[in-house]
Image (cartoon, rainbow, N blue to C red):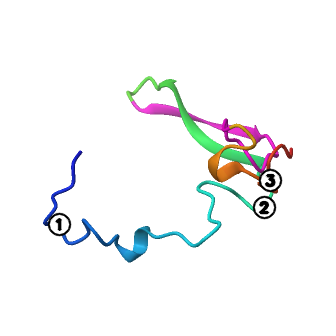
Amino acid sequence: MPLDPNHIHADTPHEKTIQPAGYRYGCKDTQRGGTHTYWLQDGWTADGRRRMVSHTTEWLPVKCGTTYAPVMGPCADCKNRGEA
């Protein structure tokens, strides 16, 4: 969508949209992983209420889940690349 040339941020970006040098979108410095429990609907009760059950997920312990090539753009020389 084209930006209106008369818009206040047409030439100067808003301060909240500027990232510091070296910022990598979505990159984590800490290990991800562990478990997470959430509720899922599993049918209906006889009186028309939702039947809910808890489900626990074991997340993979990865720091980087991107599909970028290791030398591409923001992922070049990333310290988290390829770690599990």
**Mark 1 or mark 3, which has the lower sequence index?**
1
Q: Is residue 64 magenta?
A: yes
Q: Where does residue 43 sit, x and y in percent of width and height? A: 49, 23
**Mark 2 or mark 1, which has the lower sequence index?**
1
Mark 1 against mark 3, which lies toward the viewer? 1
Range of residues picked out in magenta:
49-68
Kindly identify the amino acid type of the residue bearing the numbered disc 1: His
Find disc 3 in the rendering and name its residue.
Answer: 80
Q: Residue at left 82%, top 57%?
A: 79
Question: Is label 3 in contact with label 2 (beta carbons under 8 Å)?
Answer: no
Viewer-proximal residue among 11 and 81: 11
Q: Which mark is residue 17?
A: none
Residue at the far left: name it: 6
Viewer-proximal residue among 28 and 78: 78
Find disc 1 in the rendering and name its residue.
Answer: 7
Res. 47 image quadrant: top left
Mark 2 against mark 1, which lies toward the viewer? 1
Q: Residue at left 38%, top 27%?
A: 48
Distance in Å between CA atoms under marks 1 and 3:
38 Å
Mark 3 against mark 2, which lies toward the viewer? 3
Kindly identify the amino acid type of the residue bearing the numbered disc 2: Thr
Distance in Å between CA atoms under marks 2 and 1:
39 Å
Find disc 2 in the rendering and name its residue.
Answer: 30
Above or below 59: residue 3? below
Viewer-proximal residue among 41 and 6: 6
Circle 1 residues within 10 Å: few <14, some 14–19, many ≥20? few
